[in-house]
Amino acid sequence: MANEFLTVEEIARDSLLRLQNNLVMAALVHTDHSQEFASKGDTVQVKAPATFDAKDWDTGDSVSTQDIKEDRVLVKLDQVADVTVEITSRQLTQNIQDFGEQVTEGAMQAIAQKIDYELCKLYKGVHHYSGDAGQTPDELADIAQARKVLNDNKAPFNQRRLVVDTEADAELLVLDAIVHAEKSGTTDALREANIGRLMGFDTYMDQNIFSHGRGTLDIQNTPTNITVSGAHSEGATEVDLAGVEDGTRVEKGDIVEINEKNYAVTEQSPVASSNTVTIKITPGLKESLSGGEVVERPIEDHTANLAFHRNAFAFVNRPMALPMGGAQGAVVNYNGLSIRATMGYGMSKKVNTISWDILYGNKVLQADLACRMFGSA
């Protein structure tokens, strides 16, 4: 009796389900998917969630209709998470369950970790924060401060998330309010990561939360402050600073305070010279500056725990075309996610290979709906 081999279609379908079960951050943010094929480097338009204004109305008045404000955001598909392994004919004669547990599960865990890592990196575009930089959140008051930031920014109450690192997780888990919190989730990874619902946040632990090391920007060796150099228009995304030490720079992801308003640095700055440096920021300046306004040096090193509404960030996924030539391939789409599986044979080494890959891009959609959460000194 001839051996029956697993098909690439069977493997692809099983892979997608296993990938969904291993994702954490991608299940917590706004997602955008279409079945149109794309390639790495393509830029796609993503519909941001619609927003409306509530109007006053009284009996006898005519209602005021509003256009649906579906802002379109450009997202570059600049990430391909890939796992390629050698496989034997013997492995391909297993049933799909055994093959999945032996081979596919590990591959999907690796891809999920890569996606998760890139989503956590979006903290660099978040300019709001709560607490004291460098302090680990270890009490409910720390969560309350993050909640206040989102409340002040009028973030919707539903679909709020709180994602913390392993150290904060260890501190918060022993609090009575968390020990008795109800835990739930929609996938295996979410259930394992879920700490509970606290102060309006669905709270999770994530091993990929970043530790941020601030740049070396500091005041020069005189009694003067760091100040804005020259006039800048409202909305400007580049700001010239004076009064800084030569040789220092600002790092991407640093948070600086300019005229008592916070901004996140979008690119590593040049090295300061002649006590001046130019930094790039997001959002654009919230007001016009005439020059001389005080600039605080970036906040201290910190772990970028994130409190956010779902619409703060976007995960954008598109399918990739099947390979040309003799390779076998299958693309599977389900529930806003797409993955490609490809099987081939290498003549030079005479081995079978299977490759899984997923094309995606990430974006900060609405930075005002997120903040970095620190503890209190």
Image (cartoon, rainbow, N blue to C red):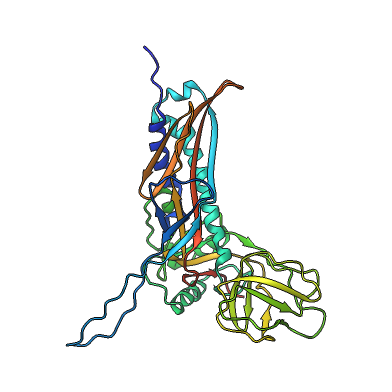
**Residue 317 in picture, x, y percent from top left:** 44, 50
Quadrant containing the N terminus in the rendered view:
top left
Q: Residue at x 48, y 21 (%)?
A: 89
> Going by the picture, which residue comes out furthest to the top?
1
Q: Nearer the viewer, residue 280 or 354?
A: 280
Residue 151 position (above or below residue 12): below
* Residue 357 coordinates in the image, percent (x, y): 50, 41
Q: Residue furthest left?
A: 60
- Left or right for 346, reference 182: right
Q: Residue at x 38, y 65 (%)?
A: 49
Residue at image position (39%, 30%) is 96
Residue 211 visible in the shown view = yes
Q: Viewer-proximal residue, 226 or 22? A: 226
Give x and y (percent) for residue 131. Answer: 57, 75
**For this rendering, which residue is in front, 175 or 225?**
225
Quadrant for residue 291, please give it: bottom right
Count how many numbered circles sit on residues in the image: 0
Is residue 165 at least partly visible in the picture?
A: no
Q: Of 6 and 279, which appears nearest the observer?
A: 279
Residue 214 position within the rendered picture, expressed as x and y whole percent measured from the top left: 68, 67
Looking at the rendered image, the quarter that the C terminus falls into is bottom right
